[in-house]
Amino acid sequence: MKTIEKFTGFTQATFDFFAGLKENNYKPWFEEHRPIYEKEVQQPLKALALAMTPEMYSIDSQFNSQPNKMISRIYRDIRFSKDKSPYKTNMWIMFQRIVPDWENFPGYYLEISDEGYQYGMGLFMAKKNVMDEYRAKIEYEPEHFRQMTKELIDKHHFVLGGDEYKRPINNSLPDYFQTWIQRKSVYLYKICPVGKEMFDAGFARHLAKEFTLLQPLYEFMVDICE
């Protein structure tokens, strides 16, 4: 097994690779640039996941800790897609428990591309019964939920995301909660351009600190999934 080097930050070659792949999304180009992909994209992503794991364990000691399984594949599944481009032009790290139905359990993610990075936490593809439990818990603890989420958005500047229902779900909660309730999936995230923080080993600590801010909401979601 290949040794994972210590995370020291990404390099400009990381983002140049993604930019080049956008313009040349076909196998001959990728195979020619595979050594760059392995050294400047795959290796630092695994190293970053490994560097963050100890602090992420303080959030949830059951997170998967195998870098090979925490990193997305660059190959696209094109079997049922009109877009036959063989490669993804972004990649991500997931921090999540190993559970039978990963869609129904909250998780953290970091995604990088040539434009920068995005990170966040939430329920991304949960089934209806899980989202029903989520809404019921909000109705049971509305003020706790309001205080927790308002601080994350107003003070820490996270953004709420997730597909909304076409038809509103009836409920008796005040307006503040509607944007949280009327969604098929729900997560908080931030989008950042390529910045100097990404080229430094301290990027791992920066992300872990940001993820820790989301811990109360993560635990709120875990309670409905366990």
Image: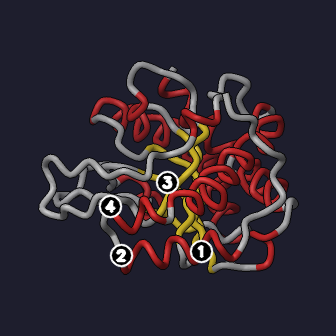
Q: Which callout, 3 or 2, points to the residue nearer the camera?
A: 2
Per the model, the C-alpha gap separating discs 3 and 2 is: 32 Å
Place residue 59 in its image quadrant.
Answer: top right
Question: How would you rate the neighbour count of disc 4 (Cα within 10 Å): few for under 14, some for 14-19, many for 20 or more?
Answer: few
Q: Is residue 8 above or below residue 121?
A: below
Label 4: which residue? 27
Residue 24: which disc?
2
Please tell me which of labels 3 and 1 falls first in the chain. Answer: 1
Element under disc 1: helix
Residue 212: which disc?
none
Q: Which callout, 3 or 1, points to the residue nearer the camera?
A: 1
Label 1: which residue? 15
Per the model, the C-alpha gap separating discs 4 and 1 is: 19 Å
Q: Which amino acid lies under the numbered mark 1 shown in the image of this protein?
A: Phe
Q: Which callout, 1 or 2, points to the residue nearer the camera?
A: 2
Please tell me which of labels 4 and 3 falls first in the chain. Answer: 4
Q: Is residue 130 above or below residue 49?
A: above
Q: Taking 155 as reference, is 31 left or right?
A: left
Q: Nearer the viewer, residue 120 or 94?
A: 94
Place residue 14 in its image quadrant.
Answer: bottom right
Q: Residue at x 80, y 45 (%)?
A: 5
Per the model, the C-alpha gap separating discs 1 and 2 is: 14 Å
Per the model, the C-alpha gap separating discs 4 and 3 is: 34 Å
Please tell me which of labels 4 and 1 falls first in the chain. Answer: 1
Q: Which amino acid lies under the numbered mark 2 shown in the image of this protein?
A: Asn
Q: Nearer the viewer, residue 109 or 90?
A: 90
Q: Disc 4 vs disc 3: Cβ atoms closer than 8 Å?
A: no
Q: Residue at x 17, y 60 (%)?
A: 166
Q: Which amino acid lies under the numbered mark 4 shown in the image of this protein?
A: Lys
